[in-house]
Image (cartoon, coloured by chain):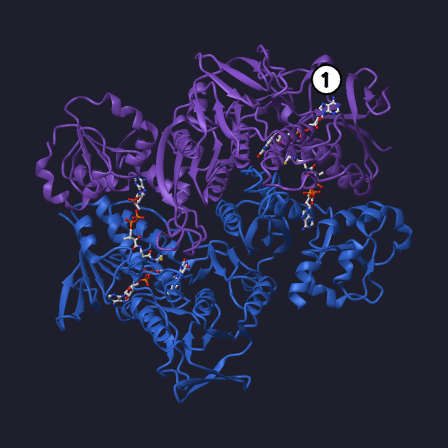
Chain colours: A purple, B blue
Amino acid sequence: MSKKVLIVGGVAGGASTAARLRRVDEEAEIIIFEKGEHISFANCGLPYHIGEVIKERDKLLVQTPEAMEARFDIDVRVMNEVLSINRGNKEVKVKDWVKGEVYTESYDVLVLSPGADPIKPPLPGIDGKNIFTLRNIPDTDLIKGFVDDNKPENAVVVGAGYIGVEMAENLHHRGVKVSVVELAPQVLGPIDADMAAIVHNHMRTKGVDLHLSDGVKAFREEGDKTIVELQSGKEIKASLVVMSIGVKPSTKLAKEAGLELGETGAIKVNKHLQTSDESIYAIGDAIEVVDFVTKKPAHIPLAGPANKQGRIVANNLAGAKEKFVGTQGTAIAKVFDLTVAATGNNEKQLKEAGIDYQVSYTNSKNHAGYYPGAIPMTIKIIFTPDKGKLLGAQIVGYDGVDKRIDILATAIRFEKTVFDLQELELAYAPPFGSAKDPVNMAGFTAGNILKGMVDVIYWHELEDLSNDTIILDVREEVEVELGKIDGSINIPLNSLRDRLDELDKDKNIVIYCAVGLRGYIGARILIQHGFKKVKNLSGGYKLYKEIIN
Amino acid sequence: MSKKVLIVGGVAGGASTAARLRRVDEEAEIIIFEKGEHISFANCGLPYHIGEVIKERDKLLVQTPEAMEARFDIDVRVMNEVLSINRGNKEVKVKDWVKGEVYTESYDVLVLSPGADPIKPPLPGIDGKNIFTLRNIPDTDLIKGFVDDNKPENAVVVGAGYIGVEMAENLHHRGVKVSVVELAPQVLGPIDADMAAIVHNHMRTKGVDLHLSDGVKAFREEGDKTIVELQSGKEIKASLVVMSIGVKPSTKLAKEAGLELGETGAIKVNKHLQTSDESIYAIGDAIEVVDFVTKKPAHIPLAGPANKQGRIVANNLAGAKEKFVGTQGTAIAKVFDLTVAATGNNEKQLKEAGIDYQVSYTNSKNHAGYYPGAIPMTIKIIFTPDKGKLLGAQIVGYDGVDKRIDILATAIRFEKTVFDLQELELAYAPPFGSAKDPVNMAGFTAGNILKGMVDVIYWHELEDLSNDTIILDVREEVEVELGKIDGSINIPLNSLRDRLDELDKDKNIVIYCAVGLRGYIGARILIQHGFKKVKNLSGGYKLYKEIIN
Ligand SMILES: Cc1cc2nc3c(=O)[nH]c(=O)nc-3n(C[C@H](O)[C@H](O)[C@H](O)COP(=O)(O)OP(=O)(O)OC[C@H]3O[C@@H](n4cnc5c(N)ncnc54)[C@H](O)[C@@H]3O)c2cc1C
Ligand SMILES: Cc1cc2nc3c(=O)[nH]c(=O)nc-3n(C[C@H](O)[C@H](O)[C@H](O)COP(=O)(O)OP(=O)(O)OC[C@H]3O[C@@H](n4cnc5c(N)ncnc54)[C@H](O)[C@@H]3O)c2cc1C
Ligand SMILES: CC(C)(COP(=O)(O)OP(=O)(O)OC[C@H]1O[C@@H](n2cnc3c(N)ncnc32)[C@H](O)[C@@H]1OP(=O)(O)O)[C@@H](O)C(=O)NCCC(=O)NCCS
Ligand SMILES: CC(C)(COP(=O)(O)OP(=O)(O)OC[C@H]1O[C@@H](n2cnc3c(N)ncnc32)[C@H](O)[C@@H]1OP(=O)(O)O)[C@@H](O)C(=O)NCCC(=O)NCCS
């Protein structure tokens, strides 16, 4: 007998489940309930439509209910909201918002992919008419309509996660002057503060006002403007406010039906993506996943995992026993001219999880330096201090960042080490890479640290140097003239061997260059000439300057 | 006591060995012998300097002897050719071409990185004044000088490997009309003929004349032109001829010294890169490597492996016991607007090695289709028919090809399967990828074949269909109007379920769409409705048309 499968939510997770399920099971009765007007829309494209980068609204609609019915023989019910689940009877109660009716529908299996809701904290004035959140097409229409009609001069984006930053950029495209307010001391939580510093500098050069370590206290209206009152006492007057401080998993249905929630507040599922009721599966932004690196519970709302979970659930409904083994949080964003990407855990997460780690920074060009258009990226990799197993990676740069984060994401997925990175044989021709790819280079550099070839010191440790530490700058004089670390002395690398006697072998020496490469070579020279206490500044002056800027 | 290390060849492998060796061993006496004028030059950039894409000649010189001496304390002797090795005395005989003197130099360890020489077959007229090969800076100066001075109207490039194709493009940039002559029926040997077909079509649209399956019989001069006589009887008149039919490993020194050569004719080395004389190491284009996939001997001359081998040898000289485990042949080329890339083995190689394999083609956009600039690439993956272990991959497309080949190269390096590709969590935001990345998609599609979800048929099998086979085109009518497979009938996918009775369940059915996706969905519908003999055309009509064009 054929199964009756009900799916709550018709976008990333829900539509993917339905499509795959039909391919594996032509007989199943499949009904998608979607409370909104649209299924299968491109959530991730919404900011770009507001910014008119994606000009046609239709492009956001990847599938329509009609096409989904024709191609996949799926009963797609938009404007139908599932109100409650009766687990005993295996039924859901549904409100048809078009007909204004409530009805029940029975199921053999229920799949929940209700997504997440933008967080709207109960701040005074939060319901003001100029204040928006962004999750779906109607939200997009509202914000875009507002921009089209009112040509706002300025906007405040509250919250600087990926969506906030994308909104800042897209409003900027539309000629809006943007202020970003963020409670944390940095934008883009998935990367660490050091890497975020590069992003801050870039956003500022684009004219975005950043208000970091500051939160919204209240909103108040003043004529057709909104005054955003910050906790610091600052006030920003804006024509438009977009709230993007994060999402919370849509758990109402599940909770009311007595399904177990996890410690993150999202729906708890097992490896096969079943909830505490084995007839009910849940996927996507609504669920708690296993962090692939720490193996701890986490809530990581991303489209790739949602789509893949949908496919796994469909397979399992057709009799497979596939597992979803965890989410590693691979994510990327275009931030004006920059590309910012991360995978695995960052330092903040590892500290919280109590996991020991070591960090290494490198700075490499996207492709051969001698081929036109070469441009550097800053790579941070994080790995275990014993075996060098990769725990996480972050990259900020331009062209070629997406490639390197994906290679690193792949290495992390396969639980590989920095030494494995050294051996990767990646495609090299001058327009695409280097004989030693940036990923190889990150592996070499980290490997050298682990093998004791060189000791490193990090930007944040420079504050605590003992007074008699020698800070040795091995860059060329012309570079030093453009800026240096206070108190450093300069001996260009190529003359270091000849000038060793200018340095005291018994003192602590911190060596640095632009990015760490020459500092490393210099350190090797010093160490092998009997200097015992030498440390190379990981990431070099370039990173240091971005951070202390 | 410190070691005395002599290095023969001062470019990719040699210079890398020297630099790393100095970093691990400050005491070693290191001498580089380079018979040419330059060390550390960018071989791979040479075609682009001729094409004036890399405008400044200086950019090709990554390191100079002076800088190498200053930074690494290395005795760099350019214009010094090693003439012979006396293994008994551990000495080499060297000719200093500047002083015109011959001298000997002793060694503790000798490292050979003499590279490879362009093949110049003994054809009548091969030494004509308009006929060039390209390996180093003087070659480049000659060709570029010729183009600058003579503004040749047309050129013949003989041999269409990576260098030949790059030369064709770069001469084209210079306004030269280019004919390419290639003995094989296809350009770019590392990819298979099917994928090469796409490249052929592209090169032809750019105005390049391709003479495939044809070789040069002889050259003869006619005034200041060269007549290239082909085996087919055709004759091409050209102002300039570039020979790029491949390279042969520089083995003269090794052979004369009685070192063992491998079955490919290149220098034989063990896993630690030692030759049959344990005091002599060899690396780079001169050596025989292990093919990473087949584990058989191979000659794969590429810069990445040469550089990495240099580093491994340096480590081993300093006491490590590192292994070079093989070369997988990851390579890439820009061919006009196209990017062409390969990693692992191709069908030709696997057939020759007698290894069973299965193939799957997909066609995916570089990033979300709804974001501007989305453009498709054709991906071919090859894997074992049992477990789906990846054996090779080839991609032809535009933006984003380099990223996907590197992810696949990484998966091959880690000996993973098509099922592992399904789980990769790659970075997704609309400008960079899709929630299901092209690499995931390749994994899904191949996985479906292996799991028996669908049977596939390949373009080359369409010739041998039995007469009563139904060829079912499930594309939309508008697509069919632009071209279809002879004898096919059309039922658009979205109406397939309603029109099943138009098809005979007992007949063989070959189903196809543009790229294979709708064909697959259609096949699933048919199979589940009792059709037993259904095959989906892998790669779809798009690939088929490129090939039979
Ligand atoms: C602006 C924006 C940009 C983003 N950019 C990226 C990006 O670049 N990369 C990335 O990986 N991720 C991005 N995401 C996140 C990504 O869209 C989500 O991770 C993904 O859509 C989650 O899929 P889901 O199926 O869980 O939820 P959704 O896709 O949100 O689908 C849930 C659906 O369920 C419906 N629903 C909820 N409750 C009910 C109910 N009771 N009855 C009926 N229907 C119900 C909702 O109306 C909704 O349409 C972005 C999200 C947004 C909003
Ligand atoms: C035009 C061109 C484009 C290329 N493009 C790419 C590409 O895009 N990607 C890629 O991966 N690879 C590419 N390659 C291949 C790459 O350059 C080689 O794989 C790499 O340089 C091999 O390093 P090697 O050290 O073995 O040889 P080489 O780099 O060639 O160095 C060998 C040196 O040894 C010297 N020598 C030889 N015999 C003696 C002797 N007896 N005494 C003293 N010196 C001696 C030679 O003069 C030469 O300079 C390209 C090569 C060429 C020519
Ligand atoms: C539109 C949507 C319903 C499509 O679901 P889908 O049919 O599973 O996905 P696709 O159209 O990408 O097709 C993938 C299928 O085609 C197959 N396929 C792809 N290319 C193929 C080819 N060339 N030959 C054969 N099969 C191919 C894949 O194997 C896969 O099938 P499988 O899952 O049965 O293995 C769903 O992705 C969706 O709703 N997307 C929009 C919402 C969203 O994801 N938002 C967040 C991101 S903005
Ligand atoms: C120029 C050449 C001699 C450089 O050799 P090299 O010094 O080993 O290579 P690089 O300059 O890339 O530096 C790599 C080293 O810097 C280290 N490094 C790189 N970035 C670093 C950073 N940010 N911090 C610390 N160390 C860093 C790496 O770990 C590596 O050192 P290791 O091998 O000791 O681990 C050699 O690559 C060469 O001759 N190239 C031109 C010829 C050629 O390759 N042709 C073919 C391709 S066109």
| Residue closer to the observer: B384 or B140 | B140
Q: Quadrant of the N terminus of chain A?
A: top right
| Ligand 3 quadrant assignment | top right
Q: Is residue A318 visible?
A: yes
Of all residues, the one furthest to the bottom in this rendering is B222
Of all residues, the one furthest to the right in this rendering is B501
Q: Position of residue B445 (x, y in %)?
A: 66, 47
Which residue is drawn at the image coordinates 56% and 18% (left, top)?
A226
A61 relative position to B71: left or right: right
Residue wearing tag 1: A253
Look at the numbered disc 1 and say if its residue's Cβ is closer than 8 Å to ligand 1: yes
Chain of the residue where label 1 is placed in the rendered structure = A
- Label 1 sits on what residue type? Leu
Q: Is residue B268 visible?
A: no
| Residue closer to the observer: B53 or B184 | B53
| Residue closer to the observer: B211 or B86 | B211
Which residue is drawn at the image coordinates 24% and 53% (left, top)?
B18
Which residue is drawn at the image coordinates 50% and 79% (left, top)?
B215
Q: Position of residue A522 (x, y in %)?
A: 21, 40
Which residue is drawn at the image coordinates 47% and 28% (left, top)?
A345
Q: Position of residue A206 (x, y in %)?
A: 44, 35
Q: Quadrant of residue A88?
A: top right
Q: Residues within 10 Å of mark 1 (few under 14, many from 20)?
A: some
Q: Quadrant of the C terminus of chain A?
A: top left
Compared with A174, B282 (above or below) is below
B108 relative position to B134: left or right: left
> At numbered mark 1, what does the secondary structure look like: helix, strand or loop?
helix
Q: Quadrant of residue B486?
A: bottom right
Q: Position of residue A481 (x, y in %)?
A: 21, 39
Of all residues, the one furthest to the left in this rendering is A501
